[in-house]
Image (spheres, rainbow, N blue to C red):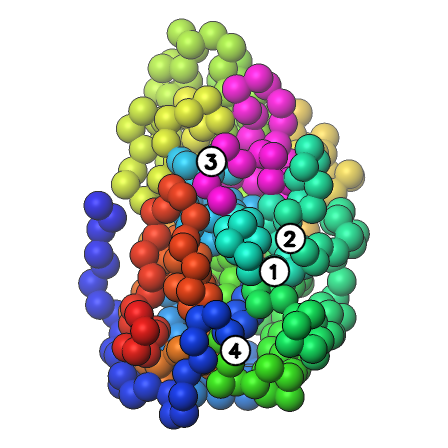
Amino acid sequence: MRAIPLIAAVVLSWLPNPGAAAVPSERTVVVLLFDGVAPALLELAPTPAFTRMREEGAFTHAFVPPFPTISLISGFTISTGCWPERHGIVTNKFLDGEGRLYDHSKDADWATDCEQLHEVAERQGVRAAALGWYGARSYSRGKLASWVDEEGPDAVPNDPTRAAQVEALLRLPAGERPRLILAYFRGPDSVEHSTGMQSSETRAAVVRMDAAVARVMKAIEDGPGVENTTLFVTTDHGMRPVSQIVNVERILRYHDIPARAVSTGTTSFLYFDDPAAIEPAAQALGTYKEFEVLRRDALPEYAHLGTGPRVAPLILSARPPYFIEDTSSWPAALRWLGRIGPRFTPAGLFVKASHGYPPGVPGMVGILYAWGDGIARGVELPYVHAVDLHPTVTALLGIEPGFPMDGTPINGFLVAEGF
């Protein structure tokens, strides 16, 4: 049973939306996921679309991601309603049981269990669009939704273009329109990493994000109508400033530890060919205050990673303001530091903010907003877990959630009728 945190916010009211709600068989659900939206970002600039959603719908500023709090593991968790121990995407980069490297892939074939939202919908006769979405296609089975856009990291459009794609789908005639639309947006993530959370570039990204949400809201009102459509706006993780990078490769060399480090965000998964080397490594690495050493067979309750072969025997989890990244991802001019440089290096030249810390670390939780048909009005919840969005969407669509399922519907977001 997952722990219930102390209530940190107040439920403002439980008034239902005015007007008649659509029956689930007629309702359309839209989910927009913007990368890297810490709640604090909404204070950087005016965000009238988000303000409207708060006033007319429901929201939380503590949308709790899995650990590590980074993009792919979070996206698959949101889409499947399962924790990583079930769906198998245990971080953004890892080795599987056969030594193959997973590296930021959205290919559904990497998942070990659980069903994606679009798969669940399509299986039950609800046509879905999955734009840049996690598990939208399988390399062995092809497209897993009726609408799937081009694949590849360079194929993700900017936020205005993505909003236009969603708008075009919403403006289709009722018989042609998908009833589930899932769309990934770049959001402010990359500019936060490179310029910081308070930069003018990040503020501009927040303004673009709000404008994209406003465009989709208008398309809903002009198309299927707010009385027949539910909109969710969410994120995969938060963000916080960082100042030092942990040079894991150099530390392993310094202690002569025979491990392969696979690092991203603020964690490094350490894989060993010789099991006898694990305990001495844990002892040596445990002397550092800059990171915590987590053992696969004794992970903290928040981890939800399981004990499968994809989870390394040892995981280094950085403490703020430190973060960890493979040296292959460092600027080319600095990669030599991984071999002979210092164990800790100032990060400001190429990274000013990051994420991946345990979800209880300030800044790591994200946002979840809901608006439209079936959504209660003027409600704020103290927290929502990432696994709970999937069964909430399926409840609004009137279909069964995927199996297995770790999440439960967010009843506090929903009007009482029909749920």
Q: Nearer the viewer, mark 1 or mark 4?
A: 1
Residue type, numbered disc 3: Asp
Residue type, numbered disc 1: Arg
Residue at image coords 48%, 70%: 25
Mark sitting earlier along the chain (4/3): 3
Instruction: Say which residue label 2 marks.
Output: 145
Mark sitting earlier along the chain (4/2): 2
Residue type, numbered disc 2: Ala
* Vertical position of residue 11 compared to residue 279: above or below: below
The local crowd at label 2, few if under 14, some if 14 to 19, many if 20 or more residues have their Cα within 10 Å, is many
Residue at image coords 37%, 46%: 405
Q: Can the viewer see residue 15?
A: yes
Instruction: Say which residue label 4 marks.
Output: 229
Mark sitting earlier along the chain (2/3): 3
Instruction: Say which residue label 1 marks.
Output: 127
The region drawn magenta spans 90-115
* Vertical position of residue 291 compared to residue 135: above or below: above
Q: Is residue 380 left or right of residue 226?
A: left
Residue at image coords 64%, 47%: 144
C-beta proximity under 8 Å, tags 1 and 4: no
